[in-house]
Image (tube, coloured by chain):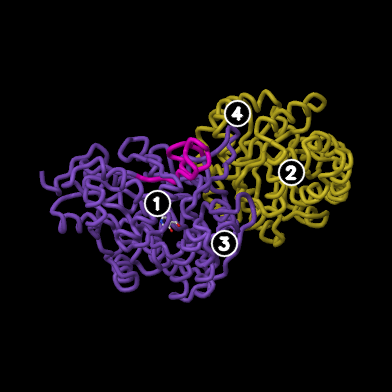
Chain colours: A yellow, B purple
Amino acid sequence: MNRITARLAEAKQQGRKALVTYIVCGDPIPEATLTTMHAMVEAGVDIIELGVPFSDPMAEGPVIALGHERALANKTSLKSTMAVVKAFRETNNGTPVVLMGYANPVERMGYEAFAVQASDAGVDGLLTVDLPPEEAAPLNVELKKAGIENIFLLAPTTSNERAESIAKLASGFLYYVSLKGVTGAGHLDVASVEAKLSDLRKITDLPICVGFGIKDASTAKAIGQYADGAVVGSLLVDRMGAMADQSPEAIAGAVVELIAPIRQGLDELAS
Amino acid sequence: MSDIEKKAAVDYSQFPDAQGHFGPYGGRFVSETLMPALDELEKMYTRLKNDPEFQKEFDYDLAHYVGRPSPLYHAERWSRELGGAQIYLKREDLNHTGAHKVNNTIGQALLAKYSGKSRIIAETGAGQHGVASATVAARLGLKCEVYMGAEDVQRQSLNVYRMKLLGATVHPVESGSRTLKDAMNEAMRDWVTNVDDTFYIIGTVAGPHPYPQLVRDFQCVIGREAREQCLKQAGKLPDALVACVGGGSNAIGLFHPFLEDEGVKIYGVEAGGYGVETGKHAAPLNDGIPGVLHGNRTYLMEDEDGQIIETHSVSAGLDYPGVGPEHAWLKDIGRAEYVAINDDEAMAAFRTLTQVEGIMPALESSHALAYAEKLAKTMDKDQIIVVNLSGRGDKDILTVAAIDGIEV
Ligand SMILES: Cc1ncc(COP(=O)(O)O)c(C=O)c1O
């Protein structure tokens, strides 16, 4: 079984909510990424979303967009990101890693080459922000062959009918974007998430993780009441961005400090 | 064969297909939040496109507000000096607001009106599209916000002030290369946040489907008029068409109504910057490869990791790493040829047209003029080239003065 499916099934069985964290590979210094990934696992993170930097990150708010700029200045690429995952797998074989980014770096590498190399590196899933299901069929074929899950986004604007057809193509989990906006936006509306998720539950049995706008334990907890997992990103990237002159250990330590209360908040929901 | 009997292997009217594809190009590569908005726009446009009331309103505005039809002017003196083909200029510079951009903003503003949205946003490079958007917004009483790269805000300061006078808010964009592509990223971010009440007026034939199609349709008035005018004034179709290509809207507007006229050669002129061989240019069809950016698949300027690279052109309106997907397809199937003109060649053509014909062209359009000059010399005196004079040069005077070392 793919690590994503296994981990989410395990969390469900244990009655706990999954914590999903997003950092940008190579940000703020290349050496920080691997150290931070391991530290996040120690701190109780279930799934790591590793951002692949892109020159034109259209869906990101200012915080994560700056993370992409820093990572690119550090010469991070799709290839070097996969190398980090490979290094991570040397000592961790259980924590799922999802690459999150934009279509063009994958296009440039070629769908087949990407799928083969990602699978070899130990990548479990791919979330391509600007590759909706309508355009994803050719990539899906290659991902399927390589055993990599294609994670699709659902949004507040997605109709139930459309959600149903997306859910049919998706695997691993569905990523529900909690608000109309970019990453890091501040206008999370919990009631609307609740309503939407209850619609989605009628459509699909896939686990649903919710992201965009989760910035602390209380928002994570509010979302965790309805979702299978909560995704935290901008909060971490913001802190990391201010630590470019510090050691990988210090950066990882700061991330753990931010994560701990969120983990605790989610665990308070445990049934 | 009369000009009405056309014979063509490809039925160009069938593109884009239902998914918005031109062969392998185009499509809809955006985040999920925007997909329903694009579906809605496509449905609305498909309906209005064939609605005589909508077309009547559009035509009325083009005639009475923009001042169409724009003349097709035979540049006799310049043609004589060059000693080759006769050059005719399609005078989009005489449109209200000074460029072809307004044809499209009139059309999209009508769509905005029909959609009931109260706010419009736009990205702009040279500022011409921003000015045209601010203009139609003022007229319709809509709120207008324009995203413009901080670098372009500097080099097109006159247009920035024009937009402000028209009541628009201009947001300088500091991210990335601080030019048109970054302005488009920022406009997309705004749209995804305010999708309920906001209509995004894209300024060229790029972006996700249906934008490349609807912008083309609105700009095709250029080519329809030019075709009719050429037949009337010269008694025959032109032998060649020349237009500059930034995103490609003025070019496709001229080209599209001629695509099935097989005898008409078609040349798109990209910005060669310091020279295509230097890598410092904005000529993806000459020196790029296919990829995905800003909602569509097309030729792009990118590095081996798939990162979009910085472009260079003396003209802000051509300084873009991508190009409309229909051009990518026309290149691949060989219906159009895409060439490049360097900064200094464009500057020379700017001066020539100003001095020989008393017409001051935009630096974007000067790229087309510079290529037409080369081409004319290889052709006979009884042949005809139609050049799209996409805009007037007033906005570029400070740039030209700076190159001349003069403070205005
Ligand atoms: C006068 C003029 N011509 C051409 C362009 C390039 O755009 P397009 O290639 O879409 O016609 C611009 C863009 O700002 C412009 O202002």
Could you say whether the residue bearing mark 2 is in a helix, strand or loop? strand
Report how far apart the C-alphas of labels 3 and 2 lie in the structure. 34 Å
Q: Disc 2 designates what residue?
A: A22
Are the residues under badges 4 and 2 in a single subunit? yes
Q: Disc 3 designates what residue?
A: B153
Read off the magenta span: B268-291
Q: Nearer the viewer, mark 3 or mark 2?
A: 3
Please tell me which residue is depicted at 21% across the width and 51% down the height of the picture: B86
A56 left or right of A91?
Answer: left
- Tell me which numbered mark, 1 or 3, is placed earlier along the sequence: 3
Q: Disc 4 designates what residue?
A: A114
**Image height of B96 relative to B2, above or below:** below
Report how far apart the C-alphas of labels 1 and 4 lie in the structure. 47 Å
| Magenta span contains residue B278 | yes
Chain letter of the residue carrying label 1: B
Instruction: Indicate the amino acid at tag 4.
Output: Phe
Instruction: Indicate the amino acid at tag 1.
Output: Ala
